[in-house]
Image (cartoon, coloured by chain):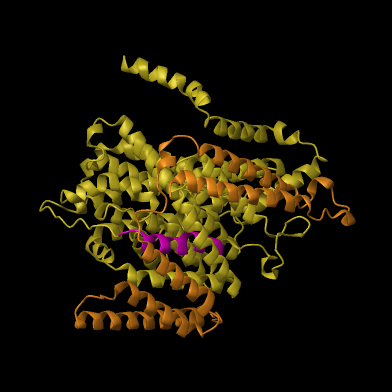
Chain colours: A yellow, B orange
Amino acid sequence: MSGLGDLITGLGTLATPEMLFHAAWATLLGIIVGSLPGLTATMGVALMTTLTYSLDSTTAILVLVCMYVGAIYGGSRSAILLNIPGTPASAATSLDGYPLAKQGRAGYAMGLATAGSALGTLAGVFMLVLVAPPLAEAALNFGSFEFFWLAVFGVLISGQLTADTTPLKGYIAGLLGLAVAMIGSEGIHAHVRFNLGVQDLNAGIALIPAMVGAFGFAEVLTAMWNRAGQLAMTKDKSDKTLPDLVDLWRYKFTIARSGLIGTMVGIIPGVGEDIGAWASYAAARKTSKEKEKFGHGSHEGLIAAETGNSAVVPGSLIPAITLAVPGSASSAVLIAALFIHGIRPGPLIMIEQPDFIGLISAMVVIATLFMAFYGLTLTRAFVQVLKVPYAYLMPVVFVLCVIGTYALSQRIFDIWIMVFFGLVGFLLRQMKYPMAPLVLGIILGDLLDKSLRRGLTLSDGELAPFFTRPVSAGFVALIVLSIALNLPAVRRVAMAPLRWFEARRGA
Amino acid sequence: MHMALADRLTAVALFLLGLALLSGGYTMDRLEIRQIHPASIPGLVPMILGVLLALCAALLFLSSFKSAARNDALVLVGGSWSRLGLTGAICTVYALGLVGWLPYFWATFLFASAFALLFSFPLDGARRAQLIAAASALALGLAIALGSSLLFRELFLVRLP
């Protein structure tokens, strides 16, 4: 139980007035960012990274974690009041949240969302402190062969699970990300690749400008392209913000299951909060005794969606910290921020900074406490935030995109990269290409490239160790299975036992 | 435009990009002069990525001919082209033109004021409403330019462009 001990130590480290002050404003800002449609958690974390260069590492990471937790939760505000998810993570929340708001119970819906988010995050933190240390120790045995397959698996599964229409577009987005990572000096022989004669490309494409473009500028364009939503302003006299404990107790199994599903989804590389919410929502609906209420203001559906998406946050930190493989797009930015602040995520984290997992878990807990406090007390203020017109909001966002990107290395070239990724990102989104695999490709490209070539050098050009080592063989099996499940014939065979079981249960 | 047509056009572009990656990787310096292991040549992964991208592009092209709901869906509909065009133009001009050409404060003041004015000015509104919109846009521009300049220059010690 040393993980829980580290968590308590971490809480002690962060219990200073200065740290609590930073956590307070960063969580509030995160909720505001998340609640505004068009501003996502990833964009918030990316922009905030550019604002935390000058802070010490612990404070900077605390601010970023609070922004992440706050933004994922904040998305529920606009999902409930506008029927427009503030972040993609809250898409499932709007299914039951908005009908509740239209019935005049917006306050209660927000209270349930707050409780669900807080419980989901805490469930994820519990898993984080228990799973991350042994996983990091197990990863110490990983060699180039295993890291190669881990990178392939990450890009592949992210492409498969985040694609809106066909997995093919997810795979293509992942390949594009990997191709972007090939630009610049490679990590083994320091040979410069694909710089197209531009000196500024010799160091490659930095993640922060690319992310700020793909998630910041692209979202400014998307927000201005889309039409504004209608605020649900009906108010019932019986409405209140504090959820009934009886209501929460009634759905204890839904909360536990959604917390577990969210955390597991978070652990899968590059999948993200929206999938966590949808998977939890679907599982709750499947097992619910009140299926007919889903989509019409079901308390259970709302709790499941919010618990699921919030549990992804600590879940996504598990592979991010222990393997340097992000569990979501926001945690990809967090990895970049950790490197900027001198913390090296990966299997060596338990040797170089053994207290870090406890510390970051404590950061998530503190962010959750502030989130719950704001969520239950500042309902009216958040409604006012949603009324800020885009004409005044978007120039602020874009100016931060530009100056934040520039501040990283004080190069105008980074602003060009940001604009390029913004324009391309907007077009790709419109054509239903997911952004998460693209980002994961950029971040894992170097690992994949170096691991493959190092592995081949170690084995003197032999491919066998890539398939015969136990962990590698496991990854290969998972990869083959993931691709094969796209084929209808394979899916039919794989699902046959489940269908048989359901038929028996029905009979 | 239907998704099927958009996919076909994208597939052609991606196929060409895949071929470019393959060719770029194949013709890349193999560093024989440094006697590196032949399996660690820098062009290896770009070549593999090129083949995979070209393969995925071909599959995307073929799948666009299937009669599926996703292929019949419309792309780039349901939004406002004029708002998108204006936003894209004004943001690009600011980021790629004004920043670096004008001092940061003035570039940001011009951009933020113009953006707010463009999207909030009531063309058919009363004189008073128009004056309020113009004053608000100028105040916003000033606040953003001053606030971000001070924050980045004084607090984060960034030498502004």
Magenta stretch contains residue A222 = yes
Residue A396 visible in image: yes
Say if B57 sits above or below B112 in the image: above
* Residue, far left: A237
The answer to which quarter of the image holds residue A410 is bottom right
Residue A319 visible in image: no
Q: Foreground: B39 or A340?
A: B39
Q: How many marks?
A: 0
The residue at the point 53 percent across, 52 percent down is A357
Percent position of residue A283, x then y: 36, 34
Q: Main secondary structure of the magenta part?
A: helix
Percent position of residue A324, x then y: 59, 51
The residue at the point 46 percent across, 19 percent down is A496
Magenta stretch contains residue B59 = no
Residue range of the region highlighted in magenta in the rendering: A208-227
In the visual, does A328 lie left or right of B50? left
Percent position of residue A348, x then y: 64, 51
Q: Quadrant of the C terminus of chain A?
A: top left
